[in-house]
Amino acid sequence: MKFLIVTHVVHTQKGTDFFAYSPYVNEMNIWLRHVNSVTIIAPLRKGDVASLQKKYNFSSINFIAVPEFSFINFKESIKAIGVLPIILWKLFRVMFSAQHIHLRCPGNMGLLGSLVQIFFPFKAKSAKYAGNWDPNAKQPLSYKFQKFVLGNTFFTHNMQVLVYGDWNNQTKNIKSFFTSTYYEKEAIAVPPKSLEAKIKFIFVGTLVKGKQPLLALQLFEKIQQDYPNLELSFYGEGEERQALENYITLHSLQSSVFLKGNQDRETMKEIYKNSHFLMLPSKSEGWPKVVAEAMFWGCLPIASSVSCVPFMLDFGKRGIVFVDNFEQNITLIQELLGKPLEYEKRRTVAMQWSRNFTLEKFEKEITKIVTPCE
């Protein structure tokens, strides 16, 4: 099978190997186990392999490099208009020779790919929409346009669009999906977690404004006024680190709030096992892997009501869903801190739910989309 990947993810080449953002490559390596020919069309940068990049586990990749482009301002838009004809022509050529077209959305390349695929109605196609598929979500126009084209059976034929969450009034193109981090063999028992001694909160993810780490810190600070046996650790790096450091110093929180940086997979497993709550007041998500990971290890999520998060948390039965009220969120958390039996109940059902979505199940579902080669 000639498998084509269309993605905006920036790649790096070292010798004959290609590297890209690790979580994305981890997933694509599962897809690539079931094909025998791969073409990738994506941006390619020169330079050293970044620390968060990983190599594809595929022996021979046909890589078609395209320029990076965006429409974030007038200057970038003018540059983009200049390179669009080249990219569109390359997309048409590689789609013409592909047997299965796979789009990674949302993104600029996904947007162009969703348009060009219209000219190939009889080819097998799939799209992974890793963003928020909620029809009522406030999103950029380009995201809404991609969702419109992919979900419209007049323009888009013979495609499965993998989205997060179950949404009403969807076309036959749309398939509710998930993602995974752990194997079945990793699902070992996790002892009950007491709320009597030190209670550990964690924030896991990139420290950027969209994920609102500062809001997590402010909520924690207020809760700690009534529950002094709490601590909060941040795992991740990003532009908001300095703001967090300044706030911690200004409010004298050095003894209970810690910035731990990025950690590897095995270290994070132990952190989840030994933590009570995950806080993620993010403005936007697709399927937040850190929420599912925390649940897998009995670390109860407290997360925003965005994308499929309410489904993941069963509207509060498997965690706490943030509301649009700062004081009410504090009340919700404090009430649960005072109910250890209810905490243990939610923690247990959260763990049971998350362990249904293993990497084995993920690969099994992938094989239904990409026919394995004999």
Image: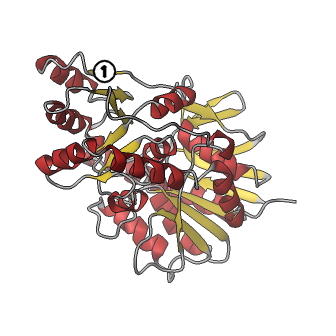
Q: Residue at x 68, y 48 (%)?
A: 30
In terms of image quadrants, where is residue 91?
Answer: bottom right
Q: In this view, does 230 lie above or below 355?
A: above
Q: Where is residue 333 in the image (x, y as percent from the top left)?
A: 24, 45
Q: Which of 259 and 187 is in front in this view?
A: 187
Residue furthest to the bottom: 154
Q: Position of residue 10 (x, y in %)?
A: 51, 39
Decide if residue 52 is in sight here: no
* 37 to the left or right of 74: right
Q: Is residue 103 above or below residue 258?
A: below
Q: Position of residue 169 (x, y in %)?
A: 41, 81
Q: Which quarter of the figure is the N terminus placed in? A: bottom right
Q: Which quarter of the figure is the C terminus placed in? A: bottom right
* 75 to the left or right of 326: right
Residue that mark 1 sits on: 258
Element class at badge 1? strand
* 337 to the left or right of 285: left
Three-letter residue code for mark 1: Phe
Q: Nearer the viewer, residue 204 or 20?
A: 204
Q: Nearer the viewer, residue 364 or 329?
A: 329
Residue furthest to the right: 374
Q: In this view, does 127 lie above or below 197?
A: below
Q: Position of residue 156 (x, y in %)?
A: 53, 76
